[in-house]
Image: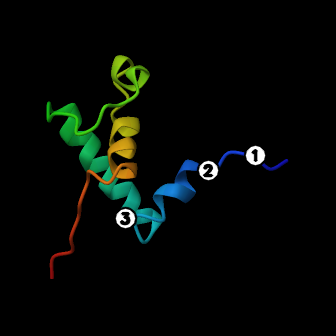
Amino acid sequence: MKSKYPDPMDILIQKVPNKYLLTCIVFLRAKELYGGDPLLVDADKRLVKEKDYIGMAEEELYEGKIEYEFEE
C-alpha cells in the first residue's frame, strides 16, 4: 500500500544529488549540533526535547539552511 505522504528521503534527495552525499551532510551537521552549534531553524519541539540531532539536521537541510560545496 502506497502512503499518501511523500517519503522524507525523496524530498531531501531533490536538494542533494545522491544518497551518500545526503547522509554525509546530515551526519556532519548533526555532529556540529551535538557539539553545541546553534540550530538554524525553528525545529519541531519534539526533536529538540528528544535531542534528535539527525532530525534537526534534516529539517535544516529541508529549509535550505545548510550549504555545501566540493573541494578539488
Callout 1 amino acid: Ser
Q: Which residue shows up at 21% across the image and 74% down it?
A: 70
> Residue 4's spot in the image, x, y percent?
74, 46
What residue would you read off at disc 3?
A: 21
Q: Is residue 54 left or right of residue 40?
A: right
Q: Is residue 30 above or below residue 51?
A: below
Q: Tell me where residue 52 sits by quadrant.
A: top left
Left or right? Give the position of 18 relative to 63: right
> Label 1 to label 2, Cα distance in Å?
8 Å
Helix, strand or loop status at disc 1? loop
- Which amino acid, by three-letter code, is at mark 3? Leu
Mark linked to residue 36: none
Upstream in the sequence, badge 3 or badge 2?
A: 2
Q: Quick check: 51 above or below 10?
A: above
Labelled pair 1, 2 in contact (Cβ < 8 Å): yes
Q: Kindly identify which residue carries mark 2.
A: 7
Q: Callout 2 environment at 10 Å: few (<14), some (14 to 19), or many (20+)?
A: few
Determine the CA span between mark 3 and mark 1: 26 Å
Say which element carries label 2. loop
- Which residue does the numbered mark 1 point to in the structure image? 3
Q: Residues within 10 Å of mark 3 (few under 14, many from 20)?
A: few
The residue at the far right in this view is 1
The spot of residue 19 in percent (x, y) is 46, 63
